[in-house]
Amino acid sequence: MRQYRDLNRLNWNDRTEIHAKSKFYDVDAFLADDAPRIGLDQEELGDVAGRTLLHLQCHFGLDTLNWARLGARVTGIDFSEKAIALARSLNDRLGLDARFLCSDIYDAKEVLGGEQFDIVYTSYGVLCWLPDLDGWADLISTSLKPGGIFYMAEFHPVTFMFEPVDGELKIADSYFNTETRQYVSDVTYTGDDDPLAHPVTYQWQHTLSEIVGALIGAGLSLEFLHEFPFTVFNMYPGLMTQDEQGRWRLKGNHHPPLLFSVKARKV
C-alpha cells in the first residue's frame, strides 16, 4: 500500500502545478476577493470563529484558507510536498496565520505530536485515496478534543458505480467492489490539457456503511448523515446541468445521491 500511495503522491505533485493555474480553482480570483466563500460545508458546520480546525488532505489549501477567513485557527495536512509549498506561499500572500504540514495521513499522528483540535474537517474526493478507513478514523478521533466535531462532505459512494455511455448513465461496477483499482489518465479533473508526468494512480472504493462504521468504531457519535442529489463539479459531462447556486445535477427525473455529509462528535 505504501508503494501505491507513493505513486499517488507523485501524481498529486503533478496535479498541483496544473491546478494552481487552472480555471477550475481560479487562484487569482480567490486572492483578489477576501470575502469568505459560503457553501454546503460552511452552512452545515456553522460558526468556526476562534476554534482550532484540522483540515485533512487539504491539497494546496484554498478551502483551508477559506476557513481561516471565517475566523478558524487552521492547520492543513497533505502528502504532496508541492501542494504544501504552494499552500504556505498563498497563506503568506494573504497575510493569514494558517499552518500547513506535509505528511501522509497514516503518519500524521506523529507529525501532529498529540495536538488536538476543536474540529477535524475533510471534503470532496478524499476517501478514494485511502486504503484503510480504520486508520483514518483513528487519526480523526485522536486529533479531536473531547466533545470536538468531525465534519466531512464527500462524493457519494454510489457515484463510483456509474459512467456515461452514449448519452446515458450506465452501471459499470459493483457498489461492493473493494479491490485496489488502477487508473491511468494523462490529464486531471480540471479539464486542462497539460499532461501528467505520473499518470498512474491507485484508488479504493468504500461503502457508506464502511465509512460511518469506521467513525463509530473510533469512538465518534454520529450527529447526522445527509445525502444530496447534486455535486460540486460536472461529474458526468453531457448528462448534467448547473443550477443557480452553481451545483451540478443530473438532467431528467433520475436523482441518485451524488454527495453525502457527516457530522460526528467525539464522546
Image: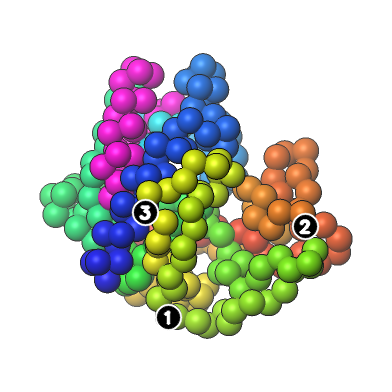
**Mark sitting earlier along the chain (3/2):** 3
The label nearer to you, 3 versus 2, is 3
Cα separation, mark 3 vs mark 2, equals 29 Å
Q: CA distance from mark 3 to mark 1?
A: 22 Å
Considering the numbered disc 2 on the image, is that residue within a helix, a strand or a loop?
loop
x%, y% of residue 190? 55, 44
Q: Which residue is mark 2?
A: 239
Q: Is residue 219 visible?
A: no
Residue 76 within the segment the image draws in magenta: yes
In the rendered image, which residue does mark 3 sit on? 198
Relative to 116, residue 89 above or below: above
Of helix, strand and loop, which one carries label 1?
Answer: loop
The residues bearing labels 2 and 1 have C-alpha atoms spaced at a distance of 28 Å
Q: Which residues are magenta?
A: 67-95
Q: Earlier in the sequence, mark 3 or mark 1?
A: 1
The quarter in which the C terminus is drawn is bottom left
For image coordinates 24% across by 61% down, the residue present is 106
Tell me the quarter of the image containing the N terminus.
Answer: bottom left
Residue at numbered disc 1: 179
Q: Inspect the image, locate mark 2, and give the three-letter code of the amino acid beneath it.
A: Leu
